[in-house]
Amino acid sequence: MGKPKIKTIGVLTSGGDAPAMNAAVRAVVRIGKERGLNVKGIKKGYNGLLNEEIIDMTPKVTADSIMRGGTILLTARCDEFKTEEGQKRGAEVCKAHGIEGLVVIGGDGSFQGARKLAELGINTIGVPGTIDLDIACTEYTIGFDTAVNTAMQAIDKIRDTSTSHERCSIVEVMGRGAGYIALWCGVATGAEDILIPESFDGNLPKVEQQIIEHLLRNRARGKTHHLVVNAEGVGHSYSMAKRIESATGIETRATILGHMQRGGSPTAKDRMYASMMGAYAVDLLCAGKSNRVVGYQNGKFMDMDIQEGLAMTKHIDDYQLQIAHLLGK
Ligand SMILES: Nc1ncnc2c1ncn2[C@@H]1O[C@H](COP(=O)(O)OP(=O)(O)OP(=O)(O)O)[C@@H](O)[C@H]1O
Ligand SMILES: O=P(O)(O)OC[C@H]1O[C@](O)(CO)[C@@H](O)[C@@H]1O
Ligand SMILES: [Mg+2]
């Protein structure tokens, strides 16, 4: 690889944190150094950019971070950056600190900000970091694998006690408007019902009635537990539990797993893919690229225009849905 034209790049994490964001940051720092670049770390996402919370990144700063959850750069959501003034100021801060290229590790919202910075002359590359897996241009996002495994382990535990008490349990998992975490956890824990926003038409009484009938059928067959994995995009787990209990007389409990799904030591897959994606982003910047998002498709890391990537829509595979349903029957 020839000598890159740019000398200094920045890296930030934005939106909800995701396990293995640290691996991506570490790769940006180490591969950046390898390519002869200065690397600056911007703390607290776009918030820290606007407040100029910028530090020099050396391999020492990222030492002992690859196995840690969260993000050593901290993260935030920043409404000011959604405004034109905020974005202009962000680009000015980059220029004032000599940051010619920027790696933004975050979700779809963060990529909107990255696109604006690219329009304002900062070479910007997005790296998909979100547990939700809700970015259409990539089959993998940093943190999803760890989050699914964390949620799966929690649900296994709930299933133990639910079976002992012969209860019905509803477990609500994260994912925002996407049902990937629910689908994966549901299949992986042998859930009887999996509720995801992609196949939810808004008719809650209908869904509850289906669960009630399924639960009663299973009880008649002698099944001692009934596990429902519900995506937060469907929600209403507590009220659902109350209505199921009063309709069936079977004790029903709801658990919302919440932020524990975003923490914890990342899986090997997340560490590996995040490392590759962080490195890939640096190499795109070295090649003079901007306004690109790194992805993983058909077994390969790739990149595409951010706008194009954001315009794509993602669908949960029909076959997977159908099989998930049959497995829980
Ligand atoms: N339209 C936009 N224009 C500019 N910046 C944006 C835009 N939308 C979001 N951002 C910036 O990106 C930040 C993170 O966005 P958001 O809260 O949607 O999370 P995300 O990156 O999608 O990650 P996750 O969904 O995993 O939490 C926002 O707080 C804001 O600073
Ligand atoms: O941490 P916050 O701001 O409550 O955001 C929670 C949201 O962030 C995510 O964890 C990641 O996008 C979603 O699954 C969830 O809806
Ligand atoms: Mg998002």
Image: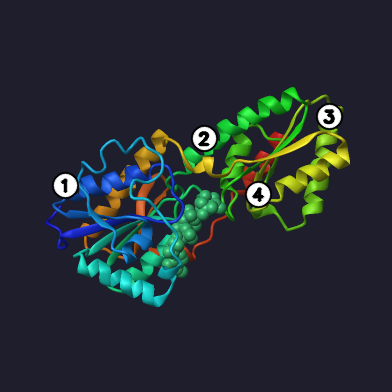
User: Label 4 to label 1, Cα distance in Å?
Assistant: 44 Å
The first of marks 4 and 3 along the sequence is 4
Number of on-image labels = 4
The first of marks 1 and 2 along the sequence is 1
Please state which amino acid type lies under the numbered disc 2: Asn
Question: Which quadrant, please, contains the C terminus?
Answer: top right
Left or right side of 312 for 73: left
Q: Which residue is mark 2?
A: 149
Callout 3: SS: helix
Q: Residue furthest bottom?
A: 85
Q: Which residue is mark 4?
A: 196
Q: Which residue is mark 1?
A: 34
User: Label 3 to label 2, Cα distance in Å?
Assistant: 29 Å
Query: Mark 1–mark 2 contact, CB under 8 Å?
Result: no
Callout 2: SS: helix
Q: Which residue is mark 3?
A: 219
Sort mark 1 into few (<14), some (14-19) or many (20+) by Cα contacts within 10 Å.
few
Q: Residue at x 22, y 69 (%)?
A: 95
